[in-house]
Every structure is written in C-alpha cells, then in structure tokens.
Amino acid sequence: MQLKTLSFSLSSPSSSSFILHSPPLSFPSISCKFRPSSFSSSRPLCVSLITISANSNDATGQQEVPTRIGFLGLGIMGSPMAQNLIKAGCNVTIWNRTKSKCDPLINLGAKYESSPMEVASSCDVTFAMLADPESAVDVACGTQGVIHGIGPGKGYVDISTVDGATSKLIGGNIKSTGALFLEAPVSGSKKPAEDGQLIFLTAGDRSLYDKVVSFLDIMGKSRFYLGDVGNGAAMKLVVNMIMGSMMATFSEGLILSEKLGLDPNVLIEVVSQGAISAPMFSTKGPSMVQALYPTAFPLKHQQKDMRLALGMAESVAQPTPIAAAANELYKVAKSRGLSDEDFSAVIEALRTKL
Ligand SMILES: NC(=O)C1=CN([C@@H]2O[C@H](COP(=O)(O)OP(=O)(O)OC[C@H]3O[C@@H](n4cnc5c(N)ncnc54)[C@H](OP(=O)(O)O)[C@@H]3O)[C@@H](O)[C@H]2O)C=CC1
Ligand SMILES: O=CCCC(=O)O
C-alpha cells in the first residue's frame, strides 16, 4: 500500500472538465474525509486528497473530474448539501419542485434551471436528493426527467433513500442513455448535512464513484463503495430499520419511566453512561421529554424506510418482528398527523390517558 497526496483546483468553473492524475481504480472501498482548507466561495478552492493506492505506478491513470454539478431536490437534506458544494467553490446548477427553496442558493451563486432535464443537460454530474421512490423515479424518468437531458460522458448520483428495485429501475433508465449511475444514500441527518459530515453508502458504476469522490468528501465524512446497484440502498434500509426500532423502544422506555414516577431525564442520563448509549438518545431524548419534535428527519420518511426495509426482508424470507411492530407504531403516529414532525414524535403514538 502506498499513501499518495493529490491536489487540484476547482477555480475554473467555465471549463467543462479538467484532469486529475489519479491512482489505478483499485483502492479500498472505505475512505475517510479530508476537508478542504477553506470554504470561502470568493476565492479558488484547493482540495487536497489523500488516496490509498495498491499500486505505486499511477502514471497510467488519468481521472476526469467533472466541474459542472447539478443538484435536484432541496429539502431538509438537499439544501445544506448543495450549499456546501457552492460554498466550496463548485459550479452548481439547481432545481427543486418548489422553486422558492432555490432562492437562498441562487443568492449564494447557484445557477437555476427549470427542469431536471435541463439541469442534467447542462451538467457533467447531477446529484438528486428526493423524498421517496415515487419522486425519485419521477424526477429521473418522468416527462421532464433527467433521462431526457443526460447522455454519454455524464453521470447521475441518486442520494435519495429508496429500495433496491427502484434504484435499479432508475439506474437502468439512466444507463440506457449512455450515462453512468451511482446510488449514494446517506447516513446522518440535518446537522451532519450542514456540517459536511454525512456517511455515503454508494454502489453502481465504479468509474463514476471515482469521478465524484471529491464532491462526496465536501458533503460527507466517509464513504463506502458497496458494489452492484441495490447494495447501497439495502445497507441504508438496514441501518434505518435498526434506527427506527431503537427509537420506538426508547420511546417506550421514556413513557414507562414517566408512568412509574421516574424522572425520564435521569433515565436518559443513565442510558448515556451505559452499554446502550447512543448519540440519538442523548440528542433527541431531552426534547422528547418536553414533547418537542423539531424536524431533522421527518417521521413520514422513517415510516417509509421501515416499510421498504420490511419489504426487503420479505423478499428474502427473513423474519423481522421487532421492526414490524415498530412500523405499526410509526403508522399510528402518521395517522395522528405527525408525518412532518421529527421521527422522535413516534413517542406520541404511545401516550394513553389513564
Ligand atoms: N432528513 C434526514 O435526516 C435524512 C433524510 N434522508 C432521506 O433523504 C431524502 C430527502 O429527505 P429530506 O431532505 O429530509 O426530505 P424533505 O421532505 O425535506 O425533502 C424532500 C425533497 O423531495 C422533493 N419532492 C418530493 N416529492 C416530489 C415529487 N413528486 N417530485 C419532485 N420532487 C419531489 C421535495 O420537493 P418540494 O420542496 O417541492 O417539496 C424536496 O426537495 C429522503 O429519501 C429521506 O429518507 C436520508 C438521510 C437523512
Ligand atoms: O435517513 C435518515 C437517517 C438519519 C440519521 O442517520 O441520523
């Protein structure tokens, strides 16, 4: 193994691409973050990358780094992710169904196009961060969708949390145009998105992964390359299935401690010092005790992920009784009008009148 430091400049947004001399495509699948030294958008950005090469002869590899970046879907996650790209000096073109959400990013220097098709047509690589399978398919493959603007030499990176079948459908349509496809769902919520600390779970075209690592490293703290399309989606859904069940059982514990006359804040403290300590409990617990649910991860999306994870488990005949029970709780919470609250509002589904 050889450690190698590479530098390149993103200071020429008008050129369509530039060449980064890179190692062969054989470096390990797990990479850590190396942050740019500055996030000022007013001067050229120098990004330093350290890549691990299994081969000391790297003179053969030349990697084209895309310069025109598209970003579709500017919700809770997409907005700060696109903002980090803009602040890092990238040349970003945006689109969102609700146009008003584009305005703050346009003020930061983003270009705007009026459809996913036009964004894909004007960019080298287009990222998308959409709500669910339906919106991800519509934006990629609908009448004004990405497939009508993308083609050979371009790439599409779908960061939305969807199931493997949806990702394969989108990937197949993108690749039929001659473009490359990468699924790249993320772990980490609103704050990690703002702080550029997301964890990317990628799968698909390895050559596209290699082209976009510098952008993933602006938005995230680590990245995994997991092979064929569907593996990133599956990993994401397993993680979120665990998270959804954890939150449901944590909610039961908080409610039960209250009913028993215990101080739930003390419960949170006890949990935080023991083997089941988790950042999620410490950060969300105190607000839950106050019945406050400021939205970082909407409850409707958590229920969507439980539903998709259960479907995935069904497809391989794997029993997941805990997740199935937790899913029912999220469905009750949705029926009580809590869809747009943070998913920690699932605790409300457990409140009963004595
Ligand atoms: N929030 C979180 O903590 C995390 C979320 N995720 C996943 O990331 C994705 C986005 O999440 P988040 O940003 O929180 O969600 P939001 O609900 O805040 O944003 C959803 C985005 O999808 C767009 N959208 C929804 N329906 C359509 C449609 N039919 N056509 C076009 N665009 C549509 C919305 O547009 P509009 O503004 O017009 O409504 C918006 O841009 C989801 O898949 C979620 O599961 C992953 C990790 C963490
Ligand atoms: O999909 C949402 C994930 C939220 C998190 O990882 O904190």
Image: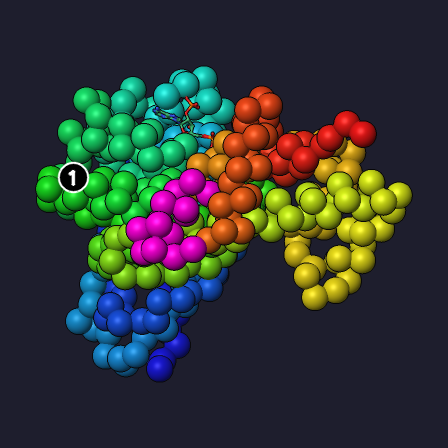
Q: Main secondary structure of the magenta part?
A: helix
Q: Quadrant of residue 5?
A: bottom left
The vertical placement of 228 against 162, above or below, is below
Magenta stretch, residue numbers: 306-319
Q: Amino acid at mark 1?
A: Asn
In the rendered image, residue 160, in percent from the top left (x then y), is placed at 38, 40
Mark 1 Cβ and ligand 1 under 8 Å apart = no
**Quadrant where the image shows the C terminus:** top right
Q: Give left or right: position of 81 versus 18.
A: right
The secondary element bearing badge 1 is classed as helix
Residue named by callout 1: 173
Q: Quadrant of residue 86?
A: top left
| x 89%, y 43%: residue | 261
Q: Tell whether position 316 is magenta.
A: yes
The vertical placement of 171 against 213, above or below, is above
In the rendered image, residue 260, in percent from the top left (x then y), is placed at 85, 45
Considering depth in this image, is 3 or 10 the residue closer to the camera? Answer: 3
Q: Give left or right: position of 178 versus 207.
A: left
In the rendered image, residue 197, in percent from the top left (x then y), is placed at 53, 51
In the rendered image, residue 202, in percent from the top left (x then y), is placed at 34, 54
Considering depth in this image, is 337 or 123 the residue closer to the camera? Answer: 337
* Count of numbered marks: 1
- Packing grade of label 1 (10 A; few <14, some 14-19, many >=20) is some
Q: Give left or right: position of 187 versus 256.
A: left
| x 49%, y 45%: residue | 324
